[in-house]
Amino acid sequence: MGGCANPLSVRSGSVPLVGRDAELAALLGAVRHPPSAVFVEGQAGVGKTRLVAEFVAAARAEDARVVLGSCQPMADPFPYGVLLDCLSQCGDHLGEPGPVTGALRDLLPELADRLPPAPRPLVDPEAERHRVFRAVRDLLCCLGPTVLVLEDLHWADEETRHVLRFVLANPPPGLSVVATYRREDLRTGAPLGRAFHVPHGVTGVNLVLRPFDTTQVRAMVDALVGSAVTSQRFAEVLAGETAGIPFVVEETVRALPDPVRDVRLGSAAARRALAGIDVPVLVADAIMERMGALPPEARAVAEAVAVLGVPEPIDVLDAVAGKAAAEHVTTLVASGVLVEQKGNRYGFRHDIARRAVYAALPGPRRWDLHERAVAVLSTVDQPPLVRLAAHARAAGMTGQWMRYSELAAEAAEEAKDVPAAVDLLSQVLADPGISAEDTNRLATTLCGYAMTGLPGGPVTARVEGLLSDPRLTPDVRGEVHLWFGLLLQREAGEVDRGAEEIARAIALLGDQPERAVRGMAAMAGPYLGTASVAEHQASLGRVEEIIEHLPTLALRTAMLATTLGGRLIVGDPSSWERIAQLPSPSDVHDPEEIHHLARAHCNVADACSWIGHYGRARTFLRTGIALAERVAASYVVGTAEATAVRLDWLSGRWTGLEQRIDRLVDAYENLLLTQDLNLTRGWLAAARGDWMRAQAAFEAATGSFPVGISAAGGMAGMLLTRGEAAAAEEQVERGVALLRRKGAWVWSGDILPQAVDCYLANGHMDAAHQLVAEATTGLRGFDAPLAQAALTACHARLASDRNEADRLYREAIDQHRALGLPYRATQLAEQAEGDDLADPSVIDALVQSYDSLGATVDAARCRHRSRGIGVATPSRRGRRGYGSELSPREQDVARLLAGGHTNREIAQALFLSRRTVEEYVVKVRRKLNAPSRHDVR
């Protein structure tokens, strides 16, 4: 194909045999115990020839004599053709042929000098025929131990079948016959003409080669590209498209533009990649050869099936094909062109075959069948709207195409498939023949759909593509700029570009405040840009003045969803009064209003989670998620899931949290909310000593407020734990600079304690006092429970009087416990004890608290302190024999090994000696059967 970046040039059969080990073993086992008869059944392309080739090579490697012949697809095959071909190869191996073999002299001129004289002719043709049968058997007997391989027996002549039945009824002692065939191409129902039962004393094997399952497809693709890189999702899609038929799998992979790259794709990308290639030439040739052998009426039905695209019942096929389909469907199924599926529906075995037939249709025939499909499918009980749109488009029925596309898009949006809804309308909008009026209406609808789903990739690209359409009116163009900007602001790395688009929209919609207000509200949010919180509050005030005059509840709720979160997240005490203005969920029924109310509740929940109202956060979150799921607002659900993850971290619900984060980061890849997820991932990894993972996560969590500030605090705390005080202070300075620039001391709860610790570790007492003084002033008059609790802890850390410090620590611990922050409360309890902690009961309580959370590093630090005073602390699960299971400490070592940490880093994280770590590594490798430390997963 043209444009292939890295096409495969592997010769067919040169890759290892995949998925047929059991069948190969059965073949070899049978021929090791002659006489034997083996029949290998399988549809075209399933791998019979490939299996036989592997078998022949293996048998010859065991010094077996193998004679190979193939039947040919001829209208009038030669009598005994394949048998004579095989026998003609055996002259060098003949023993002492008996007199009856002379009957074959005229049929086997290659052996004439080795055969006895021909016997006199017989008058009776049947007797002559019987003598030939005897001669063939006697000649095979003269060969001694021999494996006779006959391929494609479905094409054999009747005389060959009869001879084989005769021979196998009493086979020579050393003979093994291996025959392959396609059942759908047999002239009768059995490979030897009639049912054949292997006689007593003969080894009989019947193999049926099935198409590959997903695992086998994946293994085959890996073998084709020469590396185990095929994704499970790609294998699943490929198996579905090819029905797992190995020949079709191989040719399809070879047809990919860059197989080594493309086989790594996920489901959606794999479908696009496979849809974008032409039907492989060899596959198309095989399909069309089979089509050419059909009667014209049956071929017409197959063409209708190709156009319909999915399996359909006979009455639909009959109406679309314009033929009495029942009789011809029977022919098509018997010939293997169609297969019966659930619900008495009939379709091609795989979509590649359907595409091959479709591509071969002349244009007028295609148009006619698509028109018929529209007429027929529009009358069924539940019309398939997406398919009707596609058929109408293919038939040039523009009006019906647009109508069905709109209906299908609406149904897709209701089914939570926003990308499909956007794609359907985008296809219509790409047609230059659509009127300006319809273009503007559909563009507005498309943008509305896009905002309810997940941005990024094709969805955002579709919206951006609208901006180049000259048919848009200025008002609609302004709205498209707005939607596009809002979508960009949800994507990682696109925030600034999104702000630019929103600014353009506001300029275009400046004389229509009810339209521009959403852009104004987005720009007023304190999460983005470098403007101070005071400036953002002023902007929010201007937006709120407009909100009061908006004409609909949906618009007012949409704006409140943005402004309420924006006010609350900076600790504005008046926010609660404003939140009370939200309509009750029970009073809202319009899907658009429900969507905006869901967004409002989730935004308020997120703001609560940042400033320290965690109980309220969970209440708003539950309502918000329930509302969002009612209207399939997937992006709102995504932001809510990120908030829930952070709340679970803060409240000490860490079980399974790492797996949840990994799943969500994959699901929302490239979206801004992944920064929030990475922050929590960093916190969790740091607490468990997985510093490489923590550092990568914290670095991925920068770029927006307040996530970036908290990430700087998390990184600083981790570096301090590792004894890197100077590097920790660099992180502190970065985070504190962001705080000062925004004037958002409400967000200081995740960095103030780390900052003070860093300053003290580096001997910068004045800087610590100055920061605490600034925070004290900056928090006056703001609703910020978390920051206030952190500030109390900082005052305790800086108190010069021991009694005052103890009082402040108790107050800080109580505040953190009241907020539901067990990890931070435990850390403060440890810090309050000071460096001279020596009470074994206190240390044990701390260890138990850390262990219950899963805070590996903190628990290890306390155990280390306990060992330092000569007291051993028990394991969190007690001492017992773990056998082949990993002990808790071994699990910690295994996890850090899997993260790529060195023994020195593991020792530092777990407060162990390197020698002890080396011993644990040996145990972990032995229990996990890992050849090296790099194989620990």
Image (tube, rainbow, N blue to C red):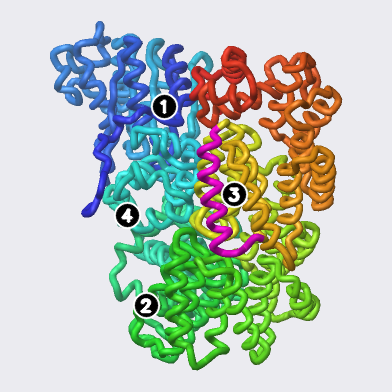
Disc 1/disc 2 C-alpha distance (Å): 65 Å
Check disc 2 and give the amino acid type.
Ala
Residue 539: x and y in percent read 58, 79
- Mark 4 is surrounded, within 10 Å at the Cα level, by few (under 14), some (14 to 19) or many (20 or more) other residues, namely many
Quadrant position of the C terminus in the picture: top right
Q: Which residue is drawn at 45% across and 29% down?
A: 20
The front one of 520 and 928 is 520
- Mark 2 is surrounded, within 10 Å at the Cα level, by few (under 14), some (14 to 19) or many (20 or more) other residues, namely few
Residues at discs 1 and 2 in contact (Cβ within 8 Å): no
Check disc 4 and give the amino acid type.
Val
Magenta portion: prevailing SS class: helix
Residues at discs 4 and 1 in contact (Cβ within 8 Å): no
Q: Name the residue under label 3.
A: 679
Residue 915: x and y in percent read 58, 12
Residues at discs 2 and 3 in contact (Cβ within 8 Å): no
Query: What numbered label is drawn on residue 430?
Result: 2
The front one of 495 and 447 is 495
Disc 4/disc 1 C-alpha distance (Å): 41 Å
Q: Is mark 1 on a helix, strand or loop?
A: helix
Q: Mark 4 points at which residue?
A: 279
Q: Name the residue under label 1.
A: 165
Q: Earlier along the polypeptide chain: callout 2 or callout 3?
A: 2
Check disc 1 and give the amino acid type.
Arg
Q: Earlier along the polypeptide chain: callout 1 or callout 3?
A: 1
Query: Which of pointers 2 and 3 indicates the residue nearer the eye?
Result: 3
Q: Which residue is drawn at 42% across and 85% down?
A: 439
Disc 2/disc 4 C-alpha distance (Å): 26 Å
Disc 3/disc 4 C-alpha distance (Å): 46 Å
Write down the region rendered in magenta. 724-745
Q: What element carries label 4?
A: loop
